[in-house]
Amino acid sequence: KAGVTQTPRYLIKTRGQQVTLSCSPISGHRSVSWYQQTPGQGLQFLFEYFSETQRNKGNFPGRFSGRQFSNSRSEMNVSTLELGDSALYLCASGGGYNEQFFGPGTRLTVL
Amino acid sequence: GENVEQHPSTLSVQEGDSAVIKCTYSDSASNYFPWYKQELGKRPQLIIDIRSNVGEKKDQRIAVTLNKTAKHFSLHITETQPEDSAVYFCAASRLGGNTGKLIFGQGTTLQVKP
């Protein structure tokens, strides 16, 4: 089985812009979770989608949003980018046995 | 709120020695505890996990123990090797509809000196 894939791998944006990141889970997995990883805050949960519905949400502002499509692929969107949004954004794919498998991440730099 | 504390933040051992990383969780409803290893520039990889109905689980040189009463769980690596050098993260979640919501510890940077 192919692993979790994320696109793009690297992004450079300027403050005020918006960005969309994509995640394709492992075939057959219906859950996709998103995390933000920074040196200062570590790994923080953003939200989880399951069968096209947001099932859980972390403590991030409304500028962070997501969605999931019928093929389980998920996108997350960050609007009105701030310098502090610079981070590695990881998605995780979850199947029937509760394990979460991570993608390679998208490195977002906000200038 | 939900929180996971992880210690130590850095750990340096000689090759062949054992390493222990400890975590404490705050949400008493947590019942699933995975451990991830993240090498520099790579994705976190699941190395072992434990559910709350089990007190200990072992996989070759890696073992995890869980004390539900104290809300502690630990990772034990025996006979460490240089390739064990990485950042290790503990996490906690609830099985079922909340498994996708992992609350992570701050990470432990393990250095194994040859």
Image (cartoon, rainbow, N blue to C red):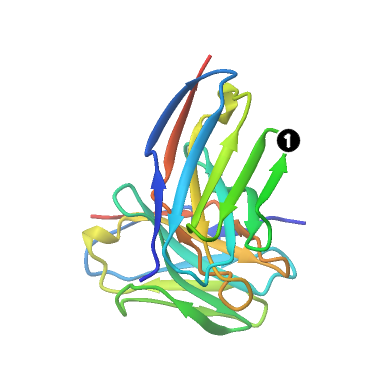
Q: Is residue B3 left or right of residue A86?
A: right
Q: Secondary structure at mark 1?
A: loop
Asked if residue B35 is positioned above or below residue B16 in the image, the reply reads below
Chain that bears disc 1: B
What residue occupies the far top of the structure in this picture? B114
Residue placed under numbered mark 1 in the picture: B60
Q: Position of residue A17 (x, y in %)?
A: 27, 69
Point out the image quarter for the N terminus of chain B.
bottom left
| Res A93 quadrant in image | bottom right
Q: Residue at x 54, y 51 (%)?
A: A104
Q: Is residue A12 left or right of residue B98?
A: left
Q: Residue at x 55, y 73 (%)?
A: A74
| Res A79 quadrant in image | bottom left
| Res B34 quadrant in image | bottom right
Q: Position of residue A37 (x, y in %)?
A: 39, 54
Give the mark count.
1
Few, some or many residues within 10 Å of mark 1 (<14, 14–19, 20+): few
